[in-house]
Amino acid sequence: MPELAEVEYFSHQWDSGLGKPIRSVFLRGEKRIFRGGDPREIPIELTGRKLIGSTTHGKQMMFRFGGGHHLGIHLGMTGAIRAFETRTYDPAKHDHLVLYQAKRVLVFHDPRLFGRVRFSSGGPPNWWTDLPPEVLSAAFTQSALTEYLARHRGAPLKALLLDQDRFPGVGNWMADEILWRAELHPRRSGGSLNREESKRLWRETRQVCRMARKTISPNLDDPPSSWLFQHRWKDGGVCPRTGTGLVRETIGGRTTCWSPGRQPEPRG
């Protein structure tokens, strides 16, 4: 599933259409990606409106149009944002939303329908303004993280890092990267961390999010070989810092990779 940096990359794929009006809209309104709303509003309200800009928040993205209209997109596991420079375009089987402009089309494509499209008219919608603080925001403080760990003291760190209500945008590979850099085993419980370990977790969470945006977001490039990312799925993969063999196991319901030479097993 696309994570924070990949979502930011996809949000810019419609940049070529900025400042230009939508001439017509195609959508498959019966599909479940439009759940919770009335997709019939979208072509009525967006036709003739200019695409003004886009923004991201964790794994969510929102596109702003003239007249105070907002289009929210969550990619899910297989969704993708695409743009094509063309005057004619026949929607493919899994193109569920197509915005036609004069010389281009803006497409949301999702083969497995795990994504979601939302639409709102007026001011910024609640489904956007009610999102939790981003990891790189001033509101994501060390004390807030410490309080969160205390409230979930029995849960494994790997599962906690995947909680989108506290770590929006952090997914499976980023959680493994954060814990590897913080030298914390993914099975450690939230309540087992001392003050220094909690500080490391806070610092590395922000650092991985910051580096992922810088490295991946511009062109969807892979991180360098010094990251765990490049070794975590290799059979016989080794830790790029200690040279010890990596271990993979299901923790918190997700396949997890860690380095025994860097992330000691929790006692008991």
Image (tube, rainbow, N blue to C red):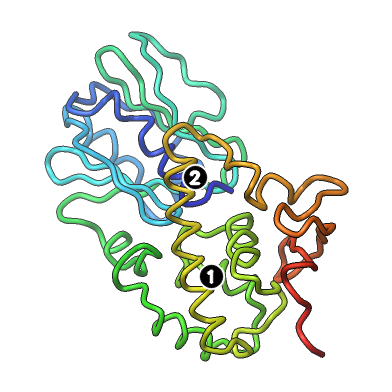
- Mark 2 in CB contact with mark 1 (< 8 angstroms): no
Residue at the location (14% across, 38% down)? Answer: 66
Residue 75 tag number: 2
Q: Is residue 28 above or below residue 186?
A: above
Side of 1 relative to 75 (left or right): right
Query: Residue 42: x and y, percent?
Result: 29, 39
Query: Residue 245: x and y, percent?
Result: 84, 57
Q: Amino acid at mark 1?
A: Asp
Quarter where residue 173 is shown = bottom right
Query: Residue 262: x and y, percent?
Result: 73, 68
- Secondary structure at badge 1 equals loop
Pick the front one: 201 or 26 = 201
Q: Residue furthest left?
A: 67
Side of 16 relative to 69 (left or right): right
Q: Is residue 194 above or below residue 111?
A: below
Q: Which residue is mark 1?
A: 163
Q: Is residue 239 above or below residue 101?
A: below
Q: Earlier in the sequence, mark 2 or mark 1?
A: 2
Side of 203 relative to 111 (left or right): left
Q: Residue furthest top?
A: 87
Query: Residue 98: x and y, percent?
Result: 39, 27
Pick the front one: 34 or 153 = 153
Pick the front one: 232 or 62 = 232
Q: Amino acid at mark 2?
A: Leu
Quarter where residue 71 is shown = top left
How many residues crowd around disc 1 within 10 Å: few (fewer than 14), some, or many (20 or more)?
Answer: few
Q: Residue furthest right?
A: 236
How far is disc 2 from disc 1 in space, using C-alphas?
A: 17 Å
